[in-house]
Amino acid sequence: MQCVFTILEPGKEARDLAVRAGMTFGRGPDNDCILSDNTVGAQHFRVSELTGELTVDDLGSTNSTKFEGGRILGTGQRQPLKQGLVFWAGETRIVVKELEQPVATSGQDVQTPEEPPETTDEDETIRASGGVPAGGNSGGRDVGEPVATFREPEVAPSPPVPPPVNEGGPVKNQPGPATPTEEGTKDFDLNAARIEKALRKLRPRLVVASAGMQKIVDISSPEFSIGRAETADLTLNHPHLSGTHAKLHFDGDKFFLEDFESRNRSYVDGSVLDPKEKREVCPEARLTFGSIETLLVMDGQDSSYAKQKRAAKILLKEKKISRAEWRDARRHAEDERRHVGEILLRDCRLEVTDWVDAEQRAGESRRTPAQLLVWIVVSILAVAIVLWTTRFLWS
């Protein structure tokens, strides 16, 4: 079984490649298809055949094999191929241009229907004599003379008939019952749609406010890369960052940060990540890449406007922001449907650590319901003691 890939490497023209089961793709010289893209693994993925279908199997690549719709293949995972499917090996884009259904065993050419078997001289003699052996009497025969009957020639089993082919076009897949692989693909499509919907609802973004950089970047993909390379989803041109420094993963419910074996490491709220470690991150988490500080914010997070207001008052008191900057931040936050903190980080000379510290202190200064009840009871007792003492002294 074969198919055709259209391969587009960064900075190169697209090329078509006939692909068969068993071929490997990667940057190493021992691959069947060598890719020069430096974001591709030494042996990135393999094309295999399973239950009559071609699949892509990830071979433990560093930058993963990503598919249109958001799916990421882990080591040993596979994805069925279908015509028109788009996927990426690192930053190399691959499109399944043509896909044939299996009509022969692996490694054999597709067979075409053979001509009917040629008739033998004996069959021709029988047919010419009207069913009587050559030399016999067609008008009559002696009793007991063996009768020459026509025997149907033994026909070899017909070879498999290939599916109809459109001239100048790819082979059309024949309809058939859904296989377990097809059912798995449908489940994957539904899960990818659910993740995309959750991502749009949360509107997550990274706020960069460090080393002279101040900007807000929307996280528009379930797999969001951060690094110095231009191919990263968030490109930060700073010497402390690696080409692909880290990646944010979203599974539809939670975010996870993975360090990509970066030289200067990645941190979550000041805690260092081990290479290739994935750690859950919460809203308003402080994410550090090398020496670059960022803040993860999203809609529906726990931080309330009252808490942000208390944090801003702390910054006002410490003269880290002015009253005019506070007023402008409130107005822009309402107009842009953003949080006050991210506007202050974007528009003011404020570090991420300043805002995070102020929010933590604002949360600690807020009284819980139990603390408020105790405060009320103590206040009432204090007033009662003062009144009783005053009455006792005047009596």
Image (cartoon, helix red, strand yellow):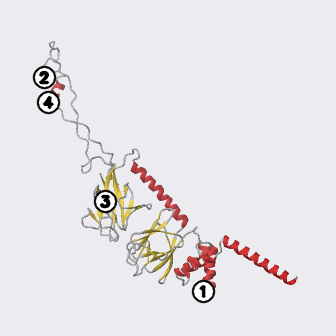
Image quarter for residue 23? bottom left
Q: Which mark is residue 156?
A: none
Inter-mark Cα distance, 2 to 3: 64 Å
The amino acid on which the numbered mark 2 sits, given as a three-letter code, is Ala
The amino acid on which the numbered mark 4 sits, given as a three-letter code, is Asp
Residue situated furthest bottom in the rendering = 319
Label 3, on which residue? 46
Counting from the top left corner in percent of width and height, residue 255 is at 49, 67
| CB within 8 Å, label 2 to label 3 | no
Label 1, on which residue? 318
Label 4, on which residue? 121
Please identify, in this view, whether the residue under mark 4 or under mark 1 is nearer the observer.
1
Please identify, in this view, whether the residue under mark 1 or under mark 3 is nearer the observer.
1
* Element at label 2: loop
Mark 4 vs mark 2: which is more N-terminal?
4
The amino acid on which the numbered mark 1 sits, given as a three-letter code, is Glu
Residue at (74, 77) in percent of width and height: 379
| CB within 8 Å, label 4 to label 1 | no
Label 2, on which residue? 134
Mark 3 vs mark 4: which is more N-terminal?
3
The amino acid on which the numbered mark 3 sits, given as a three-letter code, is Arg
